[in-house]
Image: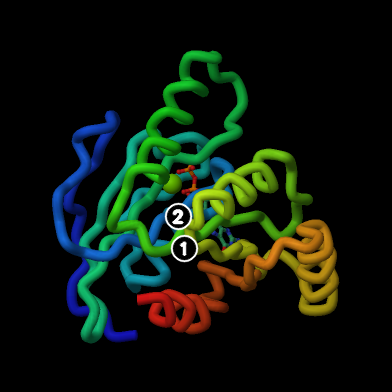
Amino acid sequence: MKIRRAELNRSCARLGQFPETPRPEIAFLGRSNVGKSSLLNALVQRKQLARTSSTPGKTRMIHFFEVDAAAHELMFVDLPGYGWARVSRRERESWQGLVEGYLEGREALRLAILLQDLRRDFSEDETLLLDWLAERGIETRVVLTKGDKLKPMRRAKRAKELRAQLGDRSVPVLLSSSQAKQGIYELWAAIRAIL
Ligand SMILES: Nc1nc2c(ncn2[C@@H]2O[C@H](COP(=O)(O)OP(=O)(O)OP(=O)(O)O)[C@@H](O)[C@H]2O)c(=O)[nH]1
Ligand SMILES: [Mg+2]
């Protein structure tokens, strides 16, 4: 995909600050440290457009990025990760209010991409979120991340196991590695298909 431009539009800590633009939005969500910001950077071919960090929970705001890719003018939305350790209930509730408020009320939202570390099992955090998204009719894809961390045989086996953990949910599952730039083309194809 030819990326003509990728730029931060705004970072928001509260509902009601979101930008008003006509761009269709693709939102990245998942556990803290799963690789949301890295995947976003890999898709737009920029090293540090979205800040990545080895300290989980760095992204506490919603970041809106304008992305001009080939003929498409999109907004990529980097959502704060959930599940980081040692946070107060108040912080957790603030995450929930912000993220659910975005997902529920955002007319421009076209696709939610839920990331899952290939090496971990799905927890209730993910399955409840998937069901929550499905109930609201929000188009969703699951992307398994950090594929480079496993050898090909093991990787394929894990992908199968994780697919099985989703039971009869119909959400498509893709495999990726932001580091090895794997699955990026396929994810762009999935994004383009829903526009
Ligand atoms: N080996 C490998 N490491 C990765 C990959 N993607 C992300 N990482 C690493 O995982 C860590 C977290 O990545 P981020 O992209 O910051 O994760 P995030 O989901 O945005 O995290 P929060 O913003 O805290 O929610 C960083 O150290 C990344 O370098 C990948 O495909 N392969
Ligand atoms: Mg991040």
**Helix, strand or loop under label 1:** helix
Residue pointed to by mark 1: 39
Q: Earlier in the sequence, mark 1 or mark 2?
A: 2
Position of residue 153 relative to residue 29, above or below, is below
Please state the total of marks drawn on the protein image.
Answer: 2
Instruction: Please rate how many residues cluster around mark 2, counting C-alpha atoms within 10 Å: few if below 14, some from 14 to 19, many from 20.
Output: many
Residue pointed to by mark 2: 28
Answer left or right for 10 relative to 99: left
Position of residue 106 relative to residue 93, above or below, is below
Query: Residue 62 in the image: x percent, y percent?
Result: 33, 41
- Label 1 sits on what residue type? Leu
Position of residue 12 relative to residue 165, above or below, is above
Residue at horizontal 82 percent and vertical 70 percent from the top: 160
**Helix, strand or loop under label 2:** strand
Label at residue 157: none
Image quadrant where residue 105 sits: top left
Name the quarter where the C terminus is drawn. bottom left
Which callout, 1 or 2, points to the residue nearer the camera? 2
Question: Does ligand 1 reach within 8 Å of label 1's beta carbon?
Answer: yes
Query: Alpha carbon of mark 1 to alpha carbon of mark 2: how far?
Result: 9 Å
Residue at horizontal 19 percent and vertical 60 percent from the top: 7
Residue at horizontal 49 percent and vertical 21 percent from the top: 93
Colour option used: rainbow
Q: Are marks 1 and 2 in contact (CB under 8 Å)?
A: yes
Instruction: Please rate how many residues cluster around mark 1, counting C-alpha atoms within 10 Å: few if below 14, some from 14 to 19, many from 20.
Output: many
Residue at horizontal 66 percent and vertical 39 percent from the top: 125
Position of residue 148 relative to residue 98, above or below, is below
Query: Residue 65 in the image: x percent, y percent?
Result: 25, 57
Query: Residue 71 in the image: x percent, y percent?
Result: 21, 85
